[in-house]
Image (cartoon, coloured by chain):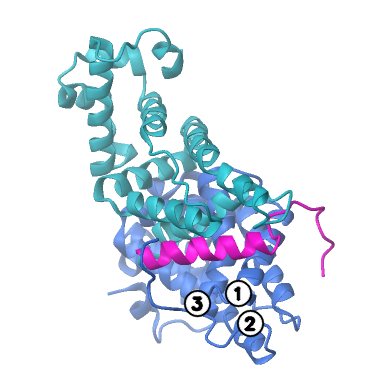
Chain colours: A cyan, B blue
């Protein structure tokens, strides 16, 4: 039984089940941000959320189940995309949203914890992928609009463009440690928009080695 | 005492110290690739490397010290850059090298282990940053050559271009789980080259919000 199945039909906004879920996911997010995935303990979460231990074990089963449900909740609460009428400005809005999220102390620590857990846990990796799929599907239509405006070539892969905006920001967060500031966000947006305009995200057959 | 300081003056190529270091770092890399940073244990490494436990504790002190020295060794053993005479082909060679490294079963697992350890350990994060600094310094001159050939504008930040080639590949490894294939490498190289030609990596003052 996955967290998703448990959820179906049992959550009424404002109902007790929804309040319990909100309290448990808040506690799980806090615990992840503080100590990482390795310290996520269902009994501790029940205590923090002031919810019965049995309820938490029955409903989420494991730290992995808890993280999967947290990611479902985070995807549902994310902001809708901004529409500015130009690809560069749309991508800049996206990049700045990612930058703000990753530099927020709680959210940044939370994402680091979930991403590192995903490297060694396939179910968490699946849940993380679903989270980003939802976010990317939210933003990719801005590329179709840019195709319609003839800003970028027909066939440009919108999902790939949105991923290209995020990639340098996650690289800074996880690898280089370079400042994750607004300038980095704007540069990521500009590089992706420039490459998209030049047709770099139109899928093509794999080229032969040089 | 850092691993670097210990090393200074004590390593003669082919000497006993060098052989011990090679055996210990090989064992540390194997252990990291198999079980991740959390399972790195100095006594276990000594056993695997067939080296006295005291030697390992005295010289590397902690799992963190061991990982730092492993990264120094990996940076030293990395391949020199390929010079092809065009920015796109140089960046493609770089992207394909990164792609091959991250998809190699041992190396890929090793990088995942070190990157995740770096998210919660500042000394490992420093060691990782030094590793990438060395690799980026090796490749960045291809951008200066492209400036000299007038392929890209004066002032283009070579380090930023090389990071832009890697970022989508690490994003696939750690976040999206999309295939890390040669086509992904070529697309990363092409996007970075295209954006660089259009001046996207010339530093400029931070722009106002739209």
Chain part drawn in magenta? A181-210
- The subunit letter for the residue under badge 2 reads B
Q: In whole angstroms, how far apart are the C-alphas of marks 1 and 3? A: 21 Å
Residue identified by numbered label 1 = B196
Residue B145: image location, x then y, percent: 65, 88
Residue B171: image location, x then y, percent: 53, 52
Check if mark 2's residue and mark 1's residue have beta carbons within 8 Å.
yes
Badge 2 and badge 3 in a common chain: yes
- The subunit letter for the residue under badge 3 reads B
For the point 54% across and 81% down, which residue is it? B156
Quarter of the image where the C terminus of chain B is located: bottom left
Please tell me which of labels 2 and 3 falls first in the chain.
3
For the point 42% across and 61% down, which residue is it? A185
Residue B49: in sight, yes or no?
no
- The subunit letter for the residue under badge 1 reads B
Please tell me which of labels 2 and 1 falls first in the chain.
2
Q: Quadrant of residue A53?
A: top left
Residue identified by numbered label 2 = B152
> Would you say residue A201 sits in the magenta stretch?
yes
Residue B34 versus residue A12 in the image, above or below: below
């Amino acid at each position: 039984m996955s967290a998703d199945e448990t959820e179906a039909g049992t959550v009424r906004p404002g109902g007790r089940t929804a309040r319990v879920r909100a309290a448990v996911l808040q506690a799980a997010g806090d615990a992840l941000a503080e100590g990482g995935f390795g310290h996520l303990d269902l009994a501790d979460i029940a205590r923090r959320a002031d919810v019965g231990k049995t309820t938490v074990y029955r409903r989420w089963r494991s730290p992995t189940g808890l993280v999967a449900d947290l990611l479902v909740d985070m995807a549902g609460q994310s902001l809708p995309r901004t529409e500015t009428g130009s690809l560069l400005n749309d991508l800049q809005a996206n990049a700045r949203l990612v930058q703000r999220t990753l530099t927020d102390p709680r959210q940044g620590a939370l994402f680091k914890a979930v991403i590192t857990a995903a490297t060694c846990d396939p179910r968490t990796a699946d849940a993380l992928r679903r989270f980003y799929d939802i976010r990317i599907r939210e933003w990719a239509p801005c590329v179709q609009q840019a195709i319609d405006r003839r800003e970028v070539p027909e066939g440009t892969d919108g999902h790939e463009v949105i991923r290209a905006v995020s990639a340098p920001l996650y690289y800074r967060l996880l690898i280089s440690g370079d400042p994750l500031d607004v300038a980095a966000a704007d540069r990521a947006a500009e590089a992706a928009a420039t490459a998209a305009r030049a047709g770099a995200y139109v899928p093509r057959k794999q080229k032969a080695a040089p």
